[in-house]
């Protein structure tokens, strides 16, 4: 067993990196060389959390393979770590880095002929290991190739998936089907007449992905924070590929958003765009659908009725929006689509289900990442402040709360009537700003909606009605919009600069990120996210989880306390 | 043996002229022989003429002490017995090495007058500490021990008899600590230091002992480990102490001396050198010893030698340069080079998440409750966090701690009768009679039930009985100051006398013995034999010329002319003890 020995001779206190024995890397933000160090490690380490003083990155085999995929060498990784490391690099980390690089590019995949692909294996030893594997032996069609073997081209995805499970990422140099041609270009100004152009980082992201149209590019994931314009990067890639495109989104609102954006910023007309959802089943040169549609089946064991959509046309490009939530059945379908160019868009590579490997092998390696703080500094995304307002429970409710069950206690705390007073106060404070009020309990939201004379969107609100309300909100005709949990995903409210959460449990990390993403669109003023919490109740536990999450994301977090005297002066 | 004169006085008087003639060239009396053997000029000349191997052998003998048992010699020097015997015989014939008896396997004695020359030879292996450039003194860290205590505070692991954790307990400790710590070793040391106790089947850190460990550990831990590591070889700590003293010593020579020392005292050790080498490495790591920049020289670190001599350990000056980082995520990032007392305090107010190069602790509601239970106040917690934090304490951290402190309820159980409750909103089991505001009567034998109910509701129970063990201090043992072992007063029996090694030849048994005398008879040689007076009394040397060998009752006898008595006498060959080897 190896134990970390912090070697005093290696101790350099002015350096900002601390490399932990589990492969995580702590980066001190207030160091004079913070930005240099961040840029040095970003290509091979994933950002896990970024609170105020120390950011945490993690070096994993996947993060190293992502780095290797863009041409970073083993010695560069070690050199960059050493250059900024305060203590010696733990030997376990060194060996893990070495091992990951050893495995990268150990197996390459080339086109042999129309029916077969050539697998090239770097060492004889590995070749004999692979050919002896129970899963691989049956798919080999010809052993007689020097330093490798041949496999049928139809199992390209399956083979890559099998190998990554064995710890070997396949370097796929087969290339892609062209797909049917599509004349698409980005516009210089939007439909509303505003000047439109790609931001520098969007250009860089699209270029990195496309790699001049060579087999080196054409598969990969662009990681950008919420509000940074991932959709625009998708459109830029479409304009480079100029081919029929299938776009997969998380829900119908997102489908509409994509379609709206395509019409707004590209030469695509309504006739070029197909919506494949519960309401409409259009397949057109650019078709936008949801993961839910693809994974729909009538019974638990029945077939996925719409999955053949992925094969239905000669798509040249498939875009996976929010790729970190792609459901497992879609991965299965994707294994058969390795001849298509694939672009993943996401704010984080971390999946709650741990299927990061599938994302890597079936969609592609990370090809672009930019720290959100950098975008915030440059004004591309809004600066956000989170504020927890602690509100006391009315004294008459305290005995009821004390003797109630845990579930009821949470509800009593959530529906604390004193919150309404605080809410009004906050609305006065932000009178000239568009405000979104989010809550969990419909009765509470209805009451607030009635009291504020603000429209409300719930799960039962029809899609058409939702779109109308969203549009009015965007235009500023409605200053306050009350939304239930349904508002958490992929709605686009460009002018919302204040969100007030009056109730709700802590959802998943993605859910919280999405919720905050609603107020991060670029604006001139600072965005604020309020959470109203009943003081000294179980609601504080959920609020604390959210607080930790938001602090981890690097948002400034403030806590305000209201007393009964403040509420009833 | 204190002097050469004492040694010479142990040689039978009748042997003095013979031996002196052999070594000095002239037959002399006891005084002249002693003076001749002690003559420094003669000794220097003799030693200068020796081979390196012989000089090494002399030095080894000097290190091994005054009397060296034959079996000790064979074991420690590790060379074949015949080769060793030959080397010793050569030294014996020069009057440098003696043997205390006639059997040929008696203790070996180095000429006492050699001491000053041996010291001169040894001097080449020592140096004044000021003449050498030393590496920086290593400072042992109690970081691992305190971190494990902090893990145990959160984990509350169950244990078997002997404070041996169950498998799950080890798994928990491994998960929290194993990337950076040797979990089992540190756990064992905490137990040895009386810092852990078993309480109701749970491994419980002993508060006072742990506090003592954190406060004194910097100064005492390395010395404690040094003495612990010497335990398997009683007296080794003292031997190291006297061998090095306040000088610098060549590592190679120190290792050789200590190897001879442990091997001469423990017959079970085979190949003592690796043991000593690993101990030297350990003591260097602990900072008890210090090496020079080339790695060839060693000395005692100044605080260590002072403590070993006086028994007093000066508290190490505060040398921790690192501060903690407190994040808005409620995490405290604590580097390894962090004050141990502060680290212990961090463990009281925050839960250890993961020990590593930078350990991660998290302030939680439960950890704040625990700290309040241990006597911290909100003000103290804030003050402490502000002091250790490199940056401004995040506002949300401050607000959370003060918010949680308000949620903290305390209950006092007045055993057998009343529940005294502070904090308004704590849930009270229904049906309890409130005898005064906040004071409830508990039905007979229901204390535990109510206590467990309150605990489930998150109310801390402050028992009237002392929950914390305050009676035990850290057990550093009684190792300081170092005292040498009591000197053994046993002296080797000198009934048979002392002789230069190899000058006296023990006689073989059986026909070979008879043949030696037959050869002398045939060649007309004069022999000096060692023979008991009148066949059974004390041993005496007799100069004889064999005349006739015969058997009586199957036993060999010899008629010989004895020059000492001037008469013919009959000797029982089987009783002849040894022969003086003639030139």
Image (cartoon, coloured by chain):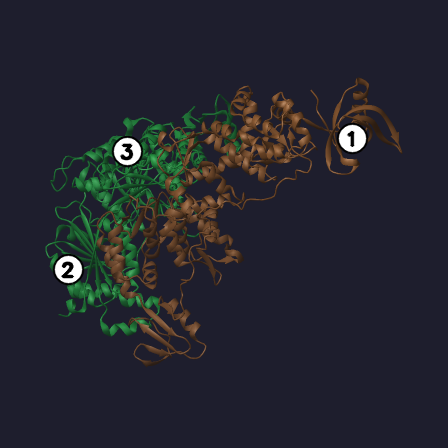
Q: Is residue A176 above or below residue A410?
A: above
At x 35%, y 66%, the residue is: B458
In front: A394, or B17? B17
Chain A, hue in figure: green
Whether labels 1 and 2 belong to a single chain: the reply is no
Asked if one can make out residue B436 in the rendered structure from this viewpoint, the answer is: yes
Mark 1, residue position: B509
Q: Is residue B286 above or below residue B370?
A: above
Where residue A336 appears, as percent x and y from the top left, is 41, 36
Which of the chains is brown? B
Whether labels 3 and 2 belong to a single chain: the reply is yes
Where residue B55 appears, as percent x and y from the top left, is 54, 24
- Find numbered disc 2 in the image and state the secondary structure of the residue it sits on: helix
Q: Is residue B173 left or right of residue B36?
A: left
Sequence-wise, the earlier of marks 3 and 2 is 3
Quarter where residue A375 is shown: top left
State the mark number for residue A40: 3
Whether labels 3 and 1 belong to a single chain: the reply is no
- Find numbered disc 1 in the image and state the secondary structure of the residue it sits on: loop
Q: Nearer the viewer, mark 3 or mark 2?
A: 3
Chain letter for mark 2, please.
A
In front: B488, or B13? B13
Between marks 3 and 2, how big is the CA–CA gap?
Answer: 43 Å
Q: Are marks 3 and 2 in contact (CB under 8 Å)?
A: no
Mark 2, residue position: A426
Between marks 1 and 2, how big is the CA–CA gap?
Answer: 114 Å
Where residue B346 appears, as percent x and y from the top left, is 32, 53
Q: How many marks?
A: 3
């Amino acid at each position: 067993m190896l134990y970390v020995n912090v070697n005093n001779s290696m101790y350099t206190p002015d350096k900002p990196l601390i490399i932990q024995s589990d492969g995580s890397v702590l980066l001190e933000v207030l160091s004079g060389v913070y930005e240099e160090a961040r840029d040095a490690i970003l290509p091979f380490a994933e950002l896990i959390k970024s609170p105020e003083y120390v950011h945490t990155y993690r070096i994993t085999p996947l993060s190293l393979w992502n780095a290797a995929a863009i041409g970073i060498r083993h010695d560069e990784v070690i050199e960059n770590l050493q250059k900024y490391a305060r203590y010696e690099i733990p030997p376990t980390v060194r060996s893990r880095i070495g091992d990951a690089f050893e495995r990268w590019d150990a197996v390459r995949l080339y086109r042999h002929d129309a029916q077969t692909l050539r697998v090239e294996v770097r060492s004889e030893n590995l070749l004999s290991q692979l050919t002896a594997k129970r899963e691989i032996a049956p798919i080999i069609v010809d052993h007689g190739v020097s330093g490798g073997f041949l496999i049928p081209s139809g199992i390209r995805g399956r083979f890559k998936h099998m190998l990554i499970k064995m710890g070997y990422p396949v370097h796929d140099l087969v290339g892609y089907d062209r797909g049917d041609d599509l004349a698409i270009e980005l516009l210089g100004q939007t439909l509303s007449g505003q000047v439109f152009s790609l931001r520098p980082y969007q250009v860089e992201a699209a270029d990195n992905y496309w790699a001049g149209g060579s087999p080196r590019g054409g598969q990969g994931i662009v990681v950008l924070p919420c509000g940074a314009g991932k959709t625009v990067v998708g459109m830029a890639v479409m304009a480079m590929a100029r081919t029929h495109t299938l776009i997969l989104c998380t829900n119908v609102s997102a489908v509409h958003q994509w379609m709206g954006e395509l019409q707004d910023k590209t030469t695509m007309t309504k006739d070029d765009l197909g919506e494949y959802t519960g309401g409409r089943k259009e397949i057109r040169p650019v078709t936008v659908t949801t993961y839910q549609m693809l994974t729909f089946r009538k019974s638990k064991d029945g077939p996925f009725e719409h999955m053949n959509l992925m094969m239905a046309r000669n798509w040249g490009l498939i875009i996976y929006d929010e790729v970190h939530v792609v459901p497992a059945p879609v991965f299965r379908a994707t294994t058969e689509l390795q001849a298509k160019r694939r672009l993943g868009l996401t704010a984080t590579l971390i999946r709650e289900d741990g299927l990061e490997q599938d994302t890597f092998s079936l969609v592609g390696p990370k090809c672009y990442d930019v720290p959100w703080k950098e975008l915030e500094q440059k004004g591309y995304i809004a600066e956000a402040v989170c504020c927890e307002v602690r509100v006391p429970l009315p004294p008459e409710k305290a005995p009821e709360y004390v003797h109630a069950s845990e579930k009821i206690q949470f509800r009593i705390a959530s529906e604390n009537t004193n919150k309404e007073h605080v809410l009004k106060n906050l609305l006065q404070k932000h009178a000239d700003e568009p405000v979104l009020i989010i809550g969990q309990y419909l009765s509470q939201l209805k009451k607030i909606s009635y009291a504020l004379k603000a429209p409300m969107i719930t799960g039962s609100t029809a899609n058409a009605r939702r779109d109308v309300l969203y549009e009015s909100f965007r235009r500023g005709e409605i200053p306050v919009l009350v939304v239930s949990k349904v508002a958490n995903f992929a709605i686009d409210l460009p002018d919302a600069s204040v969100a007030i959460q009056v109730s709700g449990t802590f959802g998943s990390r993605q859910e919280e990120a999405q919720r905050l993403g609603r107020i991060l669109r670029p604006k001139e003023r600072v965005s604020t996210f309020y959470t109203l919490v009943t003081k000294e109740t179980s609601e504080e536990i959920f609020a604390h989880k959210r607080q930790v999450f938001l602090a981890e994301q690097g948002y400034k977090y403030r806590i305000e306390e209201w007393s009964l005297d403040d509420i009833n002066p | 043996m204190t002097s050469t004169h004492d040694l010479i006085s142990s040689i039978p008087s009748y042997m003095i002229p013979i031996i002196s003639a052999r070594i000095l060239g002239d037959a002399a009396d006891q005084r002249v022989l002693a003076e001749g053997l002690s003559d420094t000029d003669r000794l220097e000349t003799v030693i200068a003429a020796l081979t390196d191997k012989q000089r090494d052998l002399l030095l080894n003998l000097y290190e091994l002490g005054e009397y060296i048992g034959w079996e000790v010699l064979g074991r420690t020097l590790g060379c074949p017995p015949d080769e060793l015997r030959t080397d010793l015989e050569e030294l014996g014939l020069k009057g440098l090495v003696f043997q205390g008896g006639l059997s040929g396997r008696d203790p070996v004695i180095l000429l006492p007058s050699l001491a000053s020359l041996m010291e001169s030879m040894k001097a080449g292996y020592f140096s004044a500490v000021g003449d050498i450039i030393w590496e920086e003194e290593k400072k042992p860290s109690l970081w691992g021990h305190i971190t494990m205590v902090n893990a145990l505070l959160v984990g509350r692991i169950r244990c078997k008899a002997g404070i041996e954790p169950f498998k799950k307990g080890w798994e928990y400790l491994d998960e929290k600590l194993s990337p950076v710590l040797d979990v089992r070793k540190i756990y064992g040391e905490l137990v040895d230091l009386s810092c852990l106790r078993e309480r109701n089947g749970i491994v419980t850190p002993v508060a006072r002992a742990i506090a003592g460990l954190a406060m004194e550990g910097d100064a005492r831990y390395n010395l404690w480990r040094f003495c612990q590591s010497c335990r398997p070889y009683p007296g080794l700590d003292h031997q190291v102490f006297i061998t090095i003293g306040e000088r610098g010593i060549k590592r190679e020579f120190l290792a050789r001396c200590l190897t001879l020392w442990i091997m001469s005292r423990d017959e079970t050790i085979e190949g003592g050198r690796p043991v000593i080498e690993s101990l030297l490495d350990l003591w260097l790591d602990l900072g008890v010893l210090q090496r020079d920049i080339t790695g060839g020289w060693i000395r005692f670190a100044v605080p260590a030698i002072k403590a070993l001599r006086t028994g007093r350990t000066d508290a190490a000056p505060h040398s921790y340069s690192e501060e903690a980082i407190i994040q808005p995520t409620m995490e405290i990032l604590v580097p390894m080079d962090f004050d141990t007392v502060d680290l212990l305090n961090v463990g009281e107010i925050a839960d250890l998440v993961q020990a590593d190069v930078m350990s991660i602790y998290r302030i939680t509601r439960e950890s704040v409750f625990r700290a309040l239970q241990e006597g911290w106040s909100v003000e103290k917690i804030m003050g402490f966090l502000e002091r250790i934090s490199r940056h401004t304490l995040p506002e949300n951290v401050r607000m959370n701690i003060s918010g949680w402190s308000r949620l903290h309820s305390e209950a006092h159980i007045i055993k057998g009768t009343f529940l005294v409750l502070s904090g308004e909103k704590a849930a009270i089991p229904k049906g309890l009679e409130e005898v005064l505001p906040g004071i409830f009567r508990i039905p007979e034998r229901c204390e535990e039930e109510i206590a467990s109910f309150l605990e489930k509701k998150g109310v801390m129970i402050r028992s009237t009985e002392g929950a914390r063990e305050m009676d035990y201090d850290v057990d550093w043992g009684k190792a300081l100051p170092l005292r040498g072992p009591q000197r053994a007063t046993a002296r080797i029996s000198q009934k048979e006398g002392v002789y230069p090694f190899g000058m006296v030849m023990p006689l073989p048994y059986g026909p070979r013995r008879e043949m030696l005398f037959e050869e002398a008879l045939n060649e007309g040689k004069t022999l000096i034999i060692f023979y008991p007076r009148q066949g059974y009394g004390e041993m005496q040397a007799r100069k004889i010329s064999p005349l006739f060998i015969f058997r009586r009752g199957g036993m060999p006898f010899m008629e010989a002319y004895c020059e000492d008595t001037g008469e013919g006498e009959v000797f029982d060959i089987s009783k002849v003890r040894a022969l003086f080897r003639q030139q």
